[in-house]
Amino acid sequence: MRLTKRKGKGSAMSENEGTARSVDASEAAELRDEMRARANMYAFFSKVFLREFDDEELARLGSSDAVPPLNERMADGSRRLARAVQVGGIDYRTRLAVEYARIFLSAGISEGTAAVPFESVYTSEDHLVMQDARDDVVALYRRHGLDVEPRLHTPEDHLGFEMEFLSTLAARSAEALSAGDDAAFAELARVQLGFLEGHVLNWIGDLAEDVEECAKDDFYPALMQIVIGYAELDVQNLRCLLE
């Protein structure tokens, strides 16, 4: 975990927040499984942007069904990802490590486009890190009892941390359902919907365009397609839950 629980802090919840509706046992069990699946998916997305893949993970991603094709964008990204891995060759992991550093860390790039995965860079007027978006997500993380590990020395609005935050809240949503706390579940859904709309989908389309321009391989552009497709679908589903 790169997002850690703050000492003495838990998730924030007001008694009057959320728009709860009661669910029966079978619906709660189905929703709980869905929330756990969401937590796993966002945890995977977090890893995409925070570290390189090992050989075992790459082998799994080479399967055409490694990522569920839940919508057209995800299906296209999944096919593109599988093809990239299948034709990558025996030294593919090494080449992807170079690709990761060049795309996301701007290694070896002296001019031109860079795909820097920080929300502030894409939402601030001067395209700088550590701007309002970073301050906003720090406040939101802390409201839910979380902090980014200081030893990482990385701004908190990194897309990997934002994905991990969503994973954490999805896991808490499953816990709320297990406890029969419909109000807590509804409030967590509301927070996740707002975060996706206000801190993820507001900028990752632009990031994806830069990744596409920087990349020499389809691997990371395909993953960006999958992330965007999943986030768009998740927004639709969360809206339905809160109706």
Image (cartoon, rainbow, N blue to C red):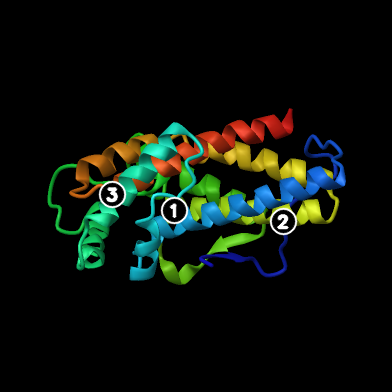
In-front residue for pair 191/63: 63
Q: Amino acid at mark 1?
A: Ala
How many numbered discs, if any?
3
Alpha carbon of mark 1 to alpha carbon of mark 3: how far? 12 Å
**Which badge, 1 or 2, is on the more N-terminal residue?**
2
In-front residue for pair 63/217: 63
Q: Residue at x 44, y 44 (%)?
A: 227
Q: Dividing the image into 4 quarters, which one contains the N terminus?
A: bottom right
Task: Tell me if residue 198 can be seen.
Answer: no
Residue 145 spot, x, y in % from top left: 66, 59
- SS type, badge 2: loop
Looking at the rendered structure, which numbered label has been put on residue 11?
2
- SS type, badge 3: helix
When asked about the image quadrant of residue 54, the answer is bottom left
How packed mark 1 is, by other alpha carbons closer than 10 Å (few <14, some 14-19, many 20 or more), is some
How packed mark 2 is, by other alpha carbons closer than 10 Å (few <14, some 14-19, many 20 or more), is some
* Residue on which disc 1 sits: 66
**Which badge, 2 or 3, is on the more N-terminal residue?**
2
Alpha carbon of mark 1 to alpha carbon of mark 2: how far? 32 Å
Residue 188 spot, x, y in % from top left: 70, 45
* Residue on which disc 3 sits: 83
Residue 128 spot, x, y in % from top left: 33, 45
Q: Is 100 placed left or right of 130 in the picture? A: left
**Which badge, 1 or 3, is on the more N-terminal residue?**
1
Q: Residue at x 85, y 45 (%)?
A: 15
Q: Residue at x 12, y 52 (%)?
A: 110
Q: Is 166 placed left or right of 189 in the picture? A: left
In-front residue for pair 35/200: 35
When asked about the image quadrant of residue 209, the answer is top left
In-front residue for pair 235/73: 73
Residue 203 spot, x, y in % from top left: 41, 36
- SS type, badge 1: loop
